Amino acid sequence: METSRSAELFAEAQHHIPGGVNSPVRAFRGVGGTPRFIEHGAGAYLYDADGNKYIDYVLSWGPLILGHAHPEIVWVVSNQAARGTSFGAPTASETELAQLITAAMPAVELVRFVSSGTEATMSAIRLARAYTKRAKVIKFAGCYHGHADEFLVQAGSGVATLGLPDSPGVPPAATADTLSVPYNDLDAVEAVLKQHHDQVAAIIVEPVAGNMGLVPPLPGYLTGLRALADAHDALLVFDEVMTGFRVAPGGAQELYGVTPDLTCLGKVIGGGLPAAAYGGRREIMQQIAPAGPVYQAGTLSGNPLAMVAGAATLRAISAPGVFERLSQVAAQLRDGFAAAAEAANVPLQAASVGSMWGFFFAAAPIRDYASAKQHADTARYARFFHAMLERGVYLAPSQFEAAFVSLAHDDAEVEYTLEAARAAFRA
Ligand SMILES: *Cc1c(COP(=O)(O)O)cnc(C)c1O
């Protein structure tokens, strides 16, 4: 496979941009090799600068549930662009997207738009702290909530780890109120709540973890978190930036039947343009300025291009049968990968939830960040990743990421991918 043009572009980019990329995983450090510079996308496919074609399972890290350059999205975005791209004043498109979200997620009574998932989680936690008049936040090791200081906390083993910053530049004071506990472990949460009695403002969780690889919640886990939050008067915040409109029309909260106090959204709701949101109970959301005293703002918040792309996306996926179809495609990939690995005698843990799927090169089940780090064979993943890339299948360039499917992924793409996987597992 020819990659010289991507290599040239990457070398040039590194002269001007740190590491040549604007978000770290894109640089392929987790798997080695040269990141592909993308020239265009269409449906389920990416086309790189050397003219190679790939079936895309990254989908811009989740947003593109309709696939690349969907005609409806192209139409609404072009149409809006011709009428102006930003006004810094309210537009009807914001209310329209808000209505689509609140209709799909009954727990979201009011919703505020921002431009990135990072802003959504950061603002939701500010609000939770203001509302409860408490400072501490429980998060789970391996769950990613964007790059705000307070969430960049080293994964701790044991019951609770008082926040040690994960990145230089994050002062210890910024993470001093962040309590990190293992995912899928209710006892650990209860112990921390008891230890910090009356101090915990919120428990924030990825209801289906997708940023340590795909790790679904164990049965009863989310219900248990709801009960613990209630018992300790803390708010339960679902970070559904990845899972919202991805695992079910109403997100993980619909799929598992658990109602959070606040919900963070992003990715799919922007239809491939920068939009994210946080929302929840009216009484809590009314605390946000200008309705209430909690400050939060944004020059491009509720950007009309993103609003119309998001609304067109949510309308398209509300058609009957869409989630059945997406879930079935993801399950076919999950089962096909499991079977291909078994035939090649390769230990593999494969999972899917709605249109998310993923796999670990591991012999033991993965339930949390510690087991992912301990058991997942990252060198093997890197080899497999490149074997698939050579065959024209674009997976995430890291073992610790989820995979996605879109409505553009059809039987032909699934069959081709499984054929490639059968060869790559043997390689
Ligand atoms: C992607 C993601 C974020 C961060 O969103 P950005 O738009 O990249 O800032 C936050 N939480 C979860 C669960 C995510 O998957």
Image (cartoon, rainbow, N blue to C red):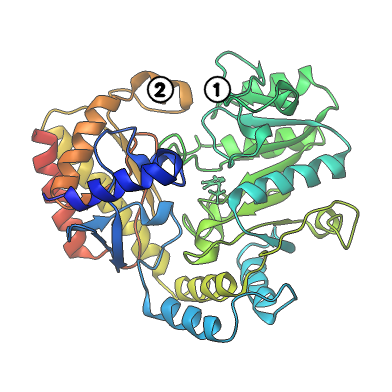
Classify 10 Å Cα crowding around label 2: few (below 14), some (14-19), many (20 and above). Answer: some
Which residue position holds label 1?
155
Label pair 1/2, CB-CB below 8 angstroms: yes
Which residue sits furthest top? 158
Q: Can residue 259 be seen by looking at this rendering? A: no
- The structure residue drawn at horizontal position 66% and vertical position 34%, both measured from the top left corner, is 149
**Which quadrant would residue 265 be assigned to in this image?**
bottom right
C-alpha separation, residue under disc 1 versus residue under disc 2: 11 Å
Q: Residue at x 64, y 78 (%)?
A: 93
Of residue 94 and residue 235, the one placed in the foreground of this image is 94
Cβ of mark 2 under 8 Å from ligand 1: the answer is no
Q: Is residue 276 above or below residue 394?
A: below
Query: Label 2, on which residue?
Result: 373
Would residue 150 appear left or right of 249 to someone viewing this image? right
Residue found 14% across the figure and 46% down from its top:
390
The image position of residue 309, as x and y in percent, is 51, 73
In what element is the residue under mark 2?
Answer: helix
**Disc number for residue 241:** none
Cβ at disc 1 under 8 Å from ligand 1 = no
- Between 195 and 130, the one lying in front of the other is 130
The residue type indicated by label 1 comes to: Ala
Q: Can the viewer see residue 66?
A: yes
Instruction: List x then y, in percent, for residue 342.
Output: 16, 33
Amino acid type at circle 2 is: Lys
Res 366 quadrant in image: top left
Q: Position of residue 81 (x, y in %)?
A: 53, 81
Name which residue lies at 44% across and 36% down: 215
